[in-house]
Image (tube, rainbow, N blue to C red):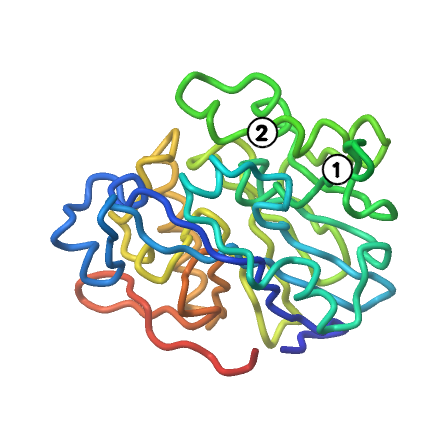
Amino acid sequence: MKIGAYDIYPIETGTFKLDGGSMFGIIPKVLWEKTNKADELNRIKLAARCLLIIGNGKVILVDDGNGNKVTKKFIDIYALDTTNNLYSSLKKFDVTPDDITDVVLSHLHFDHAGGSTIIENGVLKPAFPNAKYHVQKSQWENALNPTERDRASYIPQDYLPLKEYGLLNLIEGETELFSQISILVSNGHTPGLQLLKISDGKQTLFYAADLMPCTSHIPLPYIMGFDLNPLITLADKKRILKQAVEENWTIFFEHDPDVIAGKVKKTEKGYTFDSPIESF
């Protein structure tokens, strides 16, 4: 896909599984399992899909998946499959870790920021040494002092080295990060969830991150049990989906195992997924 000065590519970093009930909150299993089949442990398959944006002298990576620092216990719990990993996916576009100029992290949960750091010769260091890592200040502060409810979602070795190496850029609120690339913020899932909007006035791609992880999360009540403030998530979905339909945005789905991106429509029953796009 090309928008304005940017060439945009999906980057697959593998799949993993999370509890289906947790992924859909108050929605009964009899409903969510119509679109997301659960395994014998009630887990559903999810993608860990990132975005590569190249243009205007920038090579931007949006999120970086679970990473490769994981233990066997982690692999077993989350059924992690990295057959398609971050580095092999980048290589398909002739991009190396040294080429990345910027990493925009939607938030610091392990499935979004795990690839931010690596262990090399026993030393923990940033995976993209020439990049600035952009994080919302409120998210950084939450990751440093998580509550008992969300502590398990944060792995400090994924992000503490970013500050130690001087690569961290903390952002406060919504802003235009680069030309034609804006940051929107939602505080429902976690404080300072960054949502990327790439637009040239004619086409718009919206990186939904964990506001709408899958196409099945588009209907307004379909909100994850992981969200710290679900009513804020609900209000943000209403606001963003209204604009997405009115302006014909393409939505990029980070966790949908089957659909990379597509359109949304509004019916008499509310918002729903319309159709995938083939541009990618």
* Helix, strand or loop at mark 2: loop
| Image position, residue 168 (x, y; %) | 78, 34
- Screen quadrant of the N terminus: bottom right
Number of the label disc, if any, that sits on residue 119:
1
Asked where in the image residue 105 lies, by quadrant, the reply is top right
Question: What is the count of numbered marks?
Answer: 2
- Screen quadrant of the C terminus: bottom right
| Image position, residue 199 (x, y; %) | 63, 67
Q: Amino acid at mark 2?
A: Ile
Labels 1 and 2 touching (C-beta < 8 A): no
Distance from the alpha carbon under mark 1 to that under mark 2: 14 Å
* In this view, 270 is above or below 43: below
| Image position, residue 224 (x, y; %) | 33, 42
Identify the residue at horizontal 74%, vertical 58% (top origin).
60
Q: Is residue 257 left or right of residue 81?
A: left
Q: Amino acid at mark 1?
A: Ile
Identify the residue at horizontal 19%, vertical 45% (top origin).
27
Of the residues tagged 1 and 2, which is closer to the observer?
A: 1
| Image position, residue 183 (x, y; %) | 63, 49
* Foreground of the two, 167 or 238: 167
Outermost residue, bottom side? 278
Identify the residue at horizontal 47%, vertical 70% (top origin).
261
Identify the residue at horizontal 65%, vertical 54% (top origin).
62
* Foreground of the two, 151 or 267: 151
What residue would you read off at disc 2?
155
- Neighbor class of circle 2 (other Cα within 10 Å; few <14, some 14-19, many 20+) is some
